[in-house]
Amino acid sequence: MTTVTLRRPDDWHVHLRDGAALGAVVKFTAERFGRAIVMPNLKPPIATVELARGYRDRILAALPQNSRFEPLLTLYLTNDTTPQEIDRARAAGFIHGVKLYPAGATTHSDAGVTDIAKVSGVLARMENIGMPLLVHGESPHPDVDVFDRETHFIDAVLQPLLGRFPGLRVVFEHITTARAVEFVAGARAGVAATITPQHLLHNRNAIFSGGIRPHYYCLPILKREGDRQALLGAATGGTPRFFLGTDSAPHERATKESACGCAGMFTAHAALELYAEAFESVGRLDRLEGFASCFGADFYRLPRHDDTITLVKESWVPPQVYDFGHGALVPYRGGEPVAWRIADSRAA
Ligand code: DOR
Ligand code: ZN
């Protein structure tokens, strides 16, 4: 197969940042995807509907002319979030999920939830009105091995949470382990997961090949080859519970290439193309459309798009550096070939 035409896809998990950085990166997402679930981990966090409204306006203002891209906003859950704020979020119409960061788990998560019991009232309201909870599923405790944080979280937090709120709709974000695949596949109705391109294409050796490679450092961290294989099986298996979420997370170069570098890989410039590589590697390009363009929309109860995008198998080389507003951004695969390119985008 040398071309693939898909219904336009959506990115169900992306970091667009703010200010000049937003202006530098949003076009990459908007060129490929019709909509994206935008993460709220700014400084200060997008913890209220009013902050989300302002952020949405800034995203819309930063889009290329004539773009039809639609940002889907999320609220950052804190210990102090109220059920009334959830009602306001629903009424606003542009907020499609509430993000749970366990405090300390990742970039800008210090305002996150310190104990899930503190947000019971909010979760009950979300369960009532059908507002999805988007979960960064890692236990942040320093005594839990970094490679076991996702598994620990499943047992310590997620499993009990799904039992306590049996109607709560949950997206287990950027899953990275065979255990998470098995857990989501066997979970009750209303549970789904997103999978990133880097976790489909790499195992943890990528972080250490020939030296330490900070541009392969993201959270949850890359895992073992067996985990990668399980993720590839889930993504390409045709099961509606697994769908596309890039977790593209740009950071300025100096903050990555540092003695204490930030977590996050920037993949938005080639996101769909990278998924095509992963699906082709197991001969399942025929399943890319479901994963990229259908299952996420269905989960979020939004219409599938009617326009299409075409990928062609022609290699291209992303630049080693993009402008990041103030400073430089090192993209994933910069200076190295990507096997697929976008050939055509067509209105319905
Ligand atoms: O690698 C990551 N980067 N993981 C996250 O959960 C956050 C993200 C970011 O915002 O940079
Ligand atoms: Zn993320």
Image (spheres, helix red, strand yellow):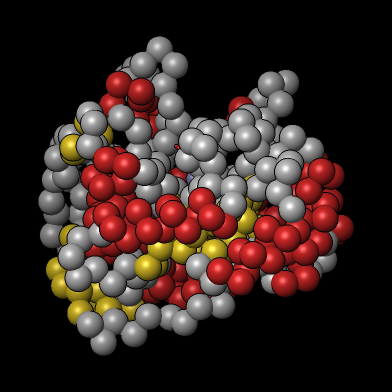
Count of numbered circles on the image:
0
Q: Is residue 266 visible?
A: no
Q: Quadrant of the C terminus?
A: bottom left
Q: Which residue is at the front of the view, 87 or 217?
A: 87
Please say if 207 is above or below 232.
Answer: above
Residue 300 visible in rendering: yes
- 143 lies left or right of 25: right
Seen in the image, is 299 located left or right of residue 290?
right
Write down the quadrant of residue 252 in the picture: top left
Which percent across, then down, holds residue 38? 45, 55
- Picture residue at 59% right of the left edge, 61% below the top: 97
Residue at left offset 56%, top offset 77% = 301
| 277 relative to 210, above or below | below
Find residue 193 and report its horizontal and vertical position in percent: 58, 59
Placement of the N terminus among the 4 image quadrants: bottom left
Which percent across, then down, holds residue 220? 54, 38
Q: Residue at x 20, y 54 (%)?
A: 339
Which residue in the rendered view is the most extreme toward the top?
259
Furthest residue in direction right, as rendered? 164
In the image shown, does 86 or 311 lie closer to the viewer? 86
Q: Position of residue 154 (x, y in %)?
A: 73, 46
Reply above or below: 142 against 60: above
Residue 274 placement, left or right of 158: left
The vertical placement of 138 against 290, above or below, is above
Residue 143, quarter of the rendered image: top right
Q: Please report the residue visible at 64 percent of the width from the left and 65 percent of the height from the top.
A: 88
Q: Quadrant of residue 226?
A: top right
Left or right of 164 in this view: 70: left
